[in-house]
Amino acid sequence: MVLKKIFGAKDDKMFPFGAKITGIMEQTPDTRLYRIKYSLGKYIPGQFVEVSVSGFGESPIGLASYSKDYVELLIRTVGNVTSKIGDLGKGDVVGIRGPFGNGFPMDEIEGKKIIVISGGTGTAPIRSVIEYVLANMKKYRGIEAFFGFRSVDDILFKDDVEKWKGKFPVHITLDNGSSKWSGPVGLITKLIEDVGVDAEDTIVITCGPPIMIKFVIQTLEKMGFRDNQIYVSLERMMQCGMGKCGHCQVGDKYVCKDGPVFLYRDSKFLKD
């Protein structure tokens, strides 16, 4: 009750609700996965929440899990808010608003095979998709994953990846090889071409740096995929989460409200 008085009511998206950090899992030297005791109610993979630290502001963070009991957020320390979150420990409280945004239409794509493609921290929302599909496997024809990371030390969700490999095909490529890596090295587009993917009854979900998404889509188009088979999660500076401040406006769309997930057919014409 005290937390509600300080932060606001849980169902009021204008004000953050106080939620406790219950777990912190190191991913890379500057990236951690935070588990926060917070039930989002009804939501879908691809949405995001606004995370705040009193006196330091808030930051939009994509959901990296799919659970009714908690939220997991992949946070990289790159700014004032995320750096302050990095100073917090298990048992500390952060403010949460949300969920916000347009996520992946998991109901609409039932009956299809799902291919997920991500680069770097774009793997966080993809993880929520994977967890959703694994919890609802009877609704889909299967799932296959392609991940790209800078180096072996930058691979995210290593424990999850090992578990996933026992359940569905997982392919990883690195920008930089090393003695610690015996897998593919090079662009993720080359990995996709080398492995091969079938466009029939298949939906692609991709998230990562804009330049990666651009060339991934070009590769998919060469392999027979149509614009209405590809969903993209756009990275853009979001702030309020409700389409009020205008920071994330592209053309007549607000990424925080109309996105961050778009069907590629609808997003390809968006211009700054």
Image (tube, rainbow, N blue to C red):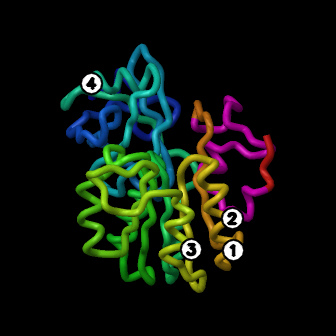
**Which disc number belongs to residue 222?**
1
**Magenta region:** 241-268
Q: Nearer the viewer, residue 190 or 69?
A: 190
- Residue positioned 44% across, 45% down in the render: 121
Residue type pointed to by label 2 = Gln
Residue pointed to by mark 3: 203
On the picture, is 53 further left or further right than 218?
Answer: left
| Circle 4 or circle 3, nearest the eye | 3
Residue pointed to by mark 2: 218
Residue 31 location, x and y as percent?
34, 36
Residue 244 location, x and y as percent?
67, 33
Asked if 269 appears above or below 164 in the picture, the reply is above
Distance, label 4 to label 2, CA atoms, is 42 Å
Tell me which corner region of the image, top left, top right, bottom left or bottom right, holds residue 136: bottom left
Mark 4 or 1, nearer chain start: 4
**Which disc number belongs to residue 88?**
4
Distance, label 4 to label 1, CA atoms, is 47 Å
- Residue positioned 32% across, 70% down in the render: 135
Residue type pointed to by label 4 = Leu
